[in-house]
Amino acid sequence: MMFIMLTRLAPEALRSPASLEQLEKKAAEQIRSKCPKVEWVHNFALLGPYDYLDIFNAPDLETAMEVSTIVRTFGQATTEVWTATEWSKYKELVRNLPQQ
C-alpha cells in the first residue's frame, strides 16, 4: 500500500540546521529498525503549512501508523497520513466498475 505523509515540525524541535539532519537520522534508524518492510519512494521539503512530504510503501495501515508515530515522537511533529493509489491502478479499477 502506498501512503503520503505530510509533516510539520514543532519550532522547538530544531535548534540549528545540523540538528535537522540528526533528527532525520534518528527517525530513519527507528523506522528501519521497527518497520523493516517500509520502502521510501520520495521525500520532499515544502514551502507552506507543512515542512515535508514523504511517499512510502507499507504492507498495511498499522505499519503506516507506526511510521507516523515514530516521526511524531522523534520529530516533535504533527503528521497527516493518506492512502494513495497510482493513477494507472486507479484507472484500471474504474474500468472494472459497473457501467450505467
Image (cartoon, rainbow, N blue to C red):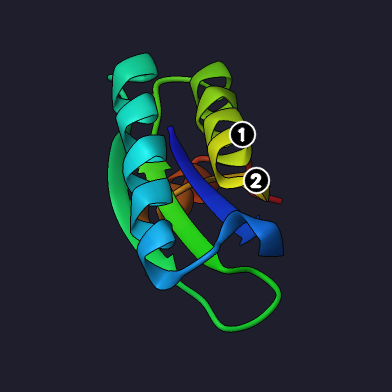
Answer with left or right where residue 46 lies relative to residue 35: right
Are the residues at dot 2 and dot 1 in contact (C-beta closer than 8 Å)?
A: yes
The answer to which image quadrant residue 69 occupies is top right
Instruction: Report the side of 64 relative to 77 (left or right).
Output: left
State the SS at label 2. loop
Q: Which mark is residue 46?
A: none
Looking at the image, the residue that sits furthest to the bottom is 47
Residue 19 visible in the picture: yes
In this rendered view, identify the residue nearer to me: 28 or 20. 20
Residue drawn 71% across the image and 51% down it: 100
Rendered residue at 38%/26% (across/down): 30
Which class describes the residues within 10 Å of circle 1: few (<14), some (14-19), or many (20+)? few
- Give above or below for 47 relative to 80: below
Note whether 12 is above or below 57 in the view shown: below
The residue furthest front is: 15
Q: Is residue 10 visible?
A: no
Task: Name the residue beneath numbered marker 2.
Answer: 76
Instruction: Name the residue tied to disc 1.
Output: 73
Q: Quarter of the image containing the N terminus?
A: top left
Q: Nearer the viewer, residue 92 or 83?
A: 83
Q: In this rendered view, identify the residue nearer to me: 91 or 83.
A: 83
Give coordinates of residue 81: x percent, y percent: 62, 44
Disc 2 crowd rating (10 Å Cα; few below 14, some 14-19, many 20+) is: some
Task: Tell me which amino acid carries mark 1.
Answer: Thr
Measured in 3D between alpha carbons, the distance from the residue under mark 2 to the one under mark 1, in whole angstroms, is 5 Å
Quadrant for residue 62, please give it: top right
